[in-house]
Image: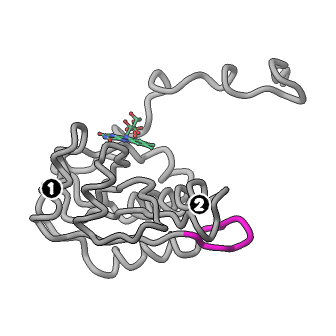
C-alpha cells in the first residue's frame, strides 16, 4: 500500500476481533517506530507491548479506552524526559504514527489513546520515573472487515485546506 493510501485509509478502530496480531506484522510495526526521526537522533522512546488480558482489562477502565479489553495488542509509548526533555513527546509521537501507518498498510486497525491513568499504568507495567507515558495505541484486526474505500476520511470530517494552510504569510491564500 502506498503511504498516501494508508494515510487516507486510516481511521480510529474501536472494535476488535480476538484474532492475534501475527508476529511478523508486529515486528514490522515496531521496526517502523524504531526507524523514526528524532531530534539529534536521541531516540528518546521505549515501547511496551502489552498482550496480557488482565493488564489490558486494567487499562480499559479509563473513560475512552473501553476497547483495550478487545484489542489483542496495546503499545504503550513512553518518552524519555531525561535524555531529551524538549523533544521526547514529539519524537515518541512521530514513532507511534509511523507504527499506525504501517499497521494500516498491514490490514490492521489502530486507535490512539490519550485516555489513561499514568500512575496506574506506571505501576502496572513497572515503568521507571524518567519515562513519561505519551500515548497508547490499540492494535488489532477490526471486528468489522476493513473496507478501505469506506474508511477513506470523508472531507466533511476534517477542516478544509483553505482554513489550515497559508501561502508565504499567515492568512494569505493559495491563488493557484
Ligand atoms: C493524541 C490522541 C489521543 C486520542 N485519544 C483517544 C482516546 O483516548 N480514545 C479514543 O477512542 N480515541 C482517541 N483518539 C482518536 C481520535 O478521537 C480520532 O483520531 C479523531 O476523532 C479522528 O478520527 P479518525 O482517527 O477516525 O480519523 C485520540 C487521537 C489522538 C491523536
Q: Residue at x 14, y 66 (%)?
A: 19
- Around disc 1, counting alpha carbons within 10 Å, would you say few (fewer than 14), some (14 to 19), or many (20 or more)? some
42 shown above or below 171: below
Q: Picture coordinates of residue 137 (x, y %)?
A: 35, 56
Figure quarter occupied by ligand 1: top left
Quadrant position of the C terminus in the picture = top right
- What residue lies at 51% left-to-right and 62% top-to-bottom? 98
Q: Is residue 113 above or below residue 160?
A: below
> Farthest residue in the right direction?
168
**Cβ atoms under marks 2 and 1 closer than 8 Å:** no
Residue where numbered disc 1 is placed: 58
Residue 173 in picture, x, y percent from top left: 81, 19
Number of labels in the image equals 2
Mark before the other along the chain sequence, 2 or 1: 1
Residue drawn at (24%, 70%), measured in percent from left and top?
21
Q: Which SS class for mark 1?
A: helix
Instruction: Locate residue 24: give its quadrant.
Output: bottom left
* Distance CA(mark 2)–CA(mark 1): 26 Å
Q: Is residue 149 magenta?
A: no
* Image location of residue 124, percent across then percent down: 22, 65
* Residue at disc 2, secondary structure: helix
Main structural element of the magenta stretch: helix, strand or loop? loop
Extent of the magenta region: 36-44
Could you say which disc has been placed on residue 88 in the image? 2
Measuring 41% from the left and 53% from the top, which residue is drawn there? 135
Q: Is residue 19 above or below residue 133?
A: below
Amino acid at each position: 500500500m502506498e503511504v498516501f493510501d494508508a494515510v487516507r485509509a486510516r481511521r480510529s478502530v474501536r472494535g476488535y476481533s480476538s484474532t492475534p496480531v501475527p508476529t511478523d506484522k508486529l515486528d514490522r510495526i515496531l521496526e517502523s517506530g524504531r526507524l523514526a526521526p528524532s531530534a539529534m537522533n536521541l531516540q528518546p522512546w521505549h515501547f511496551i507491548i502489552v498482550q496480557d488480558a488482565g493488564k489490558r482489562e486494567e487499562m480499559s477502565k479509563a473513560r475512552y479506552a473501553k476497547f483495550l479489553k478487545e484489542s489483542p495488542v496495546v503499545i504503550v509509548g513512553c518518552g524519555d524526559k531525561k535524555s531529551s526533555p524538549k523533544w521526547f513527546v514529539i519524537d515518541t509521537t512521530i514513532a507511534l504514527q509511523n507504527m499506525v501507518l504501517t499497521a494500516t498498510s498491514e490490514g490492521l486497525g489502530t486507535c490512539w489513546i490519550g485516555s489513561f491513568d499514568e500512575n496506574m499504568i506506571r505501576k502496572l507495567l513497572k515503568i521507571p520515573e524518567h519515562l513519561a507515558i505519551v500515548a497508547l495505541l490499540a492494535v488489532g484486526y477490526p471486528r468489522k472487515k476493513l473496507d478501505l474505500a469506506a474508511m477513506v476520511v470523508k472531507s466533511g470530517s476534517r477542516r478544509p485546506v483553505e482554513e489550515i494552510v497559508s501561502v508565504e504569510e499567515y492568512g494569505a491564500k493559495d491563488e493557484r
